[in-house]
Image: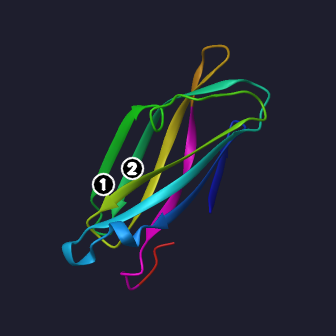
């Protein structure tokens, strides 16, 4: 698991390889990742947008931006958390993901929360990245 905290918002990510959805002979590798976002602070926040940088084993970068996560823009009161699972395919047997969530505080101010960098490792690669 990978964890990072920014301004009392803790993001924990656990990636896992999906062998049943992958086809290594066709250079198609798929991962899911489970994310838990916890508000450990005293201020209500709302997740507004996400930004991912997905890098494959050849150094090719794909950027993904959009509103919310899995179709939601959750509001987190102090002490609350939100969890979701999503996924990503790659043409290589390993890669790395990192990103940010843009949060809005109760006062209307926005700030970025770091998503920890995490490796996408499959059993089809000779060396693990992380």
Q: Most extreme residue toward the front, as rendered?
A: 20
For the point 77% across and 30% down, the residue is 78
Disc 2 + disc 1, Cβ < 8 Å: yes
**In the shown orientation, is residue 9 left or right of residue 71?**
right
Q: Position of residue 5 (x, y in %)?
A: 67, 46
Instruction: Please tell me which residue is depicted at 80% across the width and 27% down the height of the picture.
Output: 42
Q: SS for tag 1? A: strand
Q: Residue at x 50, y 66 (%)?
A: 16
Eyeballing the image, is 8 above or below 12? above
Rendering coords of residue 75 (x, y %): 63, 26
Q: Which residue is mark 2?
A: 53
Q: Nearer the viewer, residue 130 or 80?
A: 80
**Is residue 99 magenta-colored?**
no
Magenta highlight range: 112-126
Q: Which mark is residue 83?
A: none
Identify which residue, 3 or 22, lies in the foreground: 22
* Occupied quadrant, residue 31: bottom left
């Amino acid at each position: 698991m990978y964890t990072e905290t920014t301004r009392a918002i803790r993001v924990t990510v656990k990636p896992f390889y999906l062998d049943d959805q992958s086809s290594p002979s066709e250079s198609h590798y798929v991962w899911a990742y489970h994310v838990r976002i916890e508000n450990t602070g005293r201020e209500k926040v709302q997740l507004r947008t996400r930004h991912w940088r997905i890098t494959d084993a050849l150094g090719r970068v794909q950027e993904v931006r959009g509103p919310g996560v899995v179709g939601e823009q959750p509001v987190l009161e102090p002490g609350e958390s939100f969890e979701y699972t999503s996924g990503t395919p790659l043409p290589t047997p390993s890669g790395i993901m990192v990103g940010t969530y843009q949060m809005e505080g109760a006062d209307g101010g926005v700030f970025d929360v770091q998503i920890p960098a995490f490796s996408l490792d499959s059993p089809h690669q000779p060396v693990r990245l992380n």
